[in-house]
Amino acid sequence: MIIDGKKISQEIKNEVKLAAEKLKREKGIIPGLAFILVGDNPASQSYVKSKGKACEELGFYSATERVLATISESDLLAMVNRFNNDPKIHGLLVQLPLPKHIDEQKVIEAISPAKDVDGFHPVNIGKMMIGIDTFYSATPYGIVELLKRYNINPSGKHVVVIGRSNIVGKPVANMLVQKKEWANAIVTIAHTAAKDLSYYTKQADILIAAVGKPNAITKEMLKPGVVVIDVGINRIDDPSSKTGTRLVGDVDFEHVKEIASAITPVPGGVGPMTIAMLMVNTLKAAGGKI
Ligand code: NAP
């Protein structure tokens, strides 16, 4: 089975749109999401553009502040503070990475936890860790939601996560280990210190790859029937494509799909879920829910 993140993310966005209309009708609230984009990193520009488009599609209010990469840390913190105090704005997102002269963690911590729809603030990470309802960061949240909507119940299953970043590996492992009906898994996190990665991957009932390397996970490393969630987004050369490149995940999709019971493709798997869950978080920050 191919897990269709594009389809599920569209379903979620449709639900968010309806819930936003209800919020406006009943309480006069329009969910508002602000973006701060520092510098001219093309990937960051494209991410912010897609998120802005999603706001338009769902009837959200959005505001984007584009500032030069030379902005001082104190001016950026003042801008964050302005949005923290703007009643039209329910969610605030500072697109990362930031230029080297700015302390990224300081900026994340300056965002009001109540508006931290990226779920990166230590307060929200701490709440997630101890199992209190909060803003889950969008990519791990999207993975959990994909499993839920495909009726893949992680309870009692061995989930093996490859990668321990703060935005994917660690939070998804933390979410799935919670004693909740949508989680309750036995979780292992592996990373570059693993001497034999296959030792871990072969035990996975559900394998989550968040490595950032094409073909990091091959068919020989997995057991038949495994569910594979491929988070990786890697651009590789492909002379047969118009642009000369194409996107692939961390998993050797063509071969792994022969033995997996379910697998996410790249593109069209976890990727589209990220923006959908950001919209869910913004709706929630505004007081709505799907
Ligand atoms: P990251 O910060 O670079 O972390 C990669 C992790 O993989 C690290 O923990 C690293 O271990 C581990 N790793 C690397 N090579 C390994 C190997 N050979 N064996 C075992 N572990 C290995 O990356 P990230 O931010 O988590 O992102 C991971 C991938 O997901 C990237 O391709 C990224 O583009 C993609 N991504 C996709 C979305 C989406 O919306 N779909 C969102 C975020 C990220 P160490 O800690 O030991 O170095």
Image (cartoon, rainbow, N blue to C red):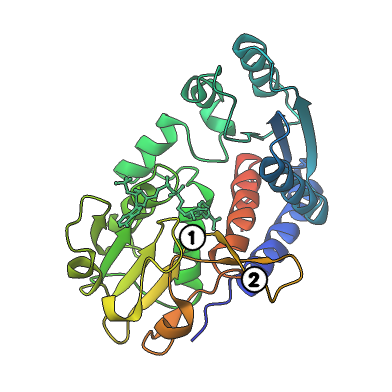
Q: Residue at x 55, y 25 (%)?
A: 112
Task: Examine the image and state in which quarter residue 256 appears.
Answer: bottom left
Placement of 241 over or under 279, stated as above or below: below
Q: Secondary structure at mark 1?
A: loop
Residue 99 in view here: yes
Q: Residue at x 44, y 65 (%)?
A: 250
Task: Examine the image and state in which quarter residue 48 appears.
Answer: top right
Neighbour tally class for label 1: few under 14, some 14-19, many 20 plus, Cα within 10 Å? many
Residue 28 in view here: no
Q: CA distance from mark 1 to mark 2?
A: 16 Å
Give residue 75's position: percent from left, percent from top.
67, 11
Q: Are marks 1 and 2 in contact (CB under 8 Å)?
A: no
Ligand 1 within 8 Å, label 1 CB: yes
Q: Is residue 104 left or right of residue 224?
A: right
Q: Which residue is mark 1?
A: 232
Going by the picture, which residue comes out furthest to the bottom?
Answer: 258
Give residue 70's position: percent from left, percent from top.
69, 17
Placement of 263 over or under 160, stated as above or below: below
In the image, what residue type sits under mark 2? Answer: Lys
Q: Secondary structure at mark 2?
A: helix
Q: Which residue is mark 2?
A: 6
Seen from the viewer's position, the closer of residues 151 and 159 is 159
Q: Is residue 43 left or right of residue 202?
A: right
Q: Residue at x 34, y 69 (%)?
A: 207
In the image, what residue type sits under mark 1? Answer: Gly
Reading the chain from its start, which is encountered first: label 1 or label 2? 2
Give residue 156's position: percent from left, percent from top.
23, 71
Q: Residue at x 65, y 74 (%)?
A: 7
Neighbour tally class for label 2: few under 14, some 14-19, many 20 plus, Cα within 10 Å? some
Give residue 62's position: percent from left, percent from top.
79, 39
Going by the picture, which residue comes out furthest to the front?
Answer: 239
